[in-house]
Amino acid sequence: CNETPDAEALLSMMANVPACETEGFVLVDASYNRVKVKNPGFFVASSAQQLLDRSPRTALTAALSESSDDILASPMLTPRIRDAVSDLRSRVLRWCQASDDALRPCMSMPDRREIARFIANIKCELLRSGAFYIIDHKLTVAAWVRQRITAPCVSKRFMNLLLKVAGG
């Protein structure tokens, strides 16, 4: 129990407490009247964490967005969520790099039938499903994945396959 003599000291305490760790303070006067002072940052952080926990799409979008470094550096995220999103990002990007390597031989194939035969032998369903698009648009697999994730109509199946190949 901390005794806080004035509102300025209370605001100072609130400013020095990580938003993701403290919901707020309860003030009690001499007559034992209680007043709750909520930390507004706590609710933002809590909502963001719940969304990342519950929504694979949100976690993947956060992990693969152009501003993922800013998201991961946010003091609003708990270390657990930050580490989970960072790990997911690493796993997806490793899969993307391995998939780029797997597609490399067909990038120089002039015949579409030869490319089709090559793609038909790809074991990974997700990569097989996007290979022609990736080749035709000269994209990296990571660029294709980012494009798909940020599309408003990304399918649940795509997200599930991506989580599966990323081991998540």
Image (cartoon, rainbow, N blue to C red):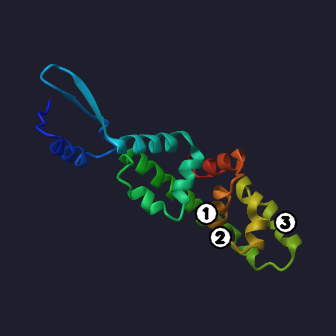
The quarter of the picture where residue 135 lies is bottom right
Between the C-alphas of marks 1 and 2, the distance is 8 Å
User: Which residue is identified by label 1?
Assistant: 96
Q: Looking at this rendering, what residue extends furthest in the right direction?
A: 113
Which amino acid is tagged 1?
Cys
Secondary structure of residue under mark 2 = loop
- Is residue 10 among the parts visible in the rendering? yes
Quick check: 54 above or below 57?
Answer: above
In contact (CB < 8 Å): disc 1 and disc 3:
no
The location of residue 154, given as percent across then percent down, is 70, 52
Which amino acid is tagged 2?
Thr
Q: State which tag comes first along the sequence, 2 or 3.
A: 3
Q: Residue at x 65, y 60 (%)?
A: 145
The quarter of the picture where residue 22 lies is top left
Q: Residue at x 53, y 49 (%)?
A: 59
Between the C-alphas of marks 2 and 3, the distance is 20 Å
Q: Label 2: few (<14), some or many (≥20) within 10 Å?
A: some
In contact (CB < 8 Å): disc 1 and disc 2:
yes
Front residue (pair 91, 45): 45
User: Which residue is identified by label 3?
Assistant: 117
Secondary structure of residue under mark 1 = helix
Q: State which tag comes first along the sequence, 1 or 3.
A: 1
The label shown at residue 14 is none
Secondary structure of residue under mark 3 = helix
Quick check: 146 above or below 106?
Answer: above
Q: Indicate left or right for 54 with 29 as reference.
A: right
The location of residue 95, given as percent across then percent down, is 59, 60
- Is residue 124 among the parts visible in the rendering? no
User: Which residue is identified by label 2?
Assistant: 140
Q: State which tag comes first along the sequence, 1 or 2.
A: 1
The quarter of the picture where residue 8 lies is top left
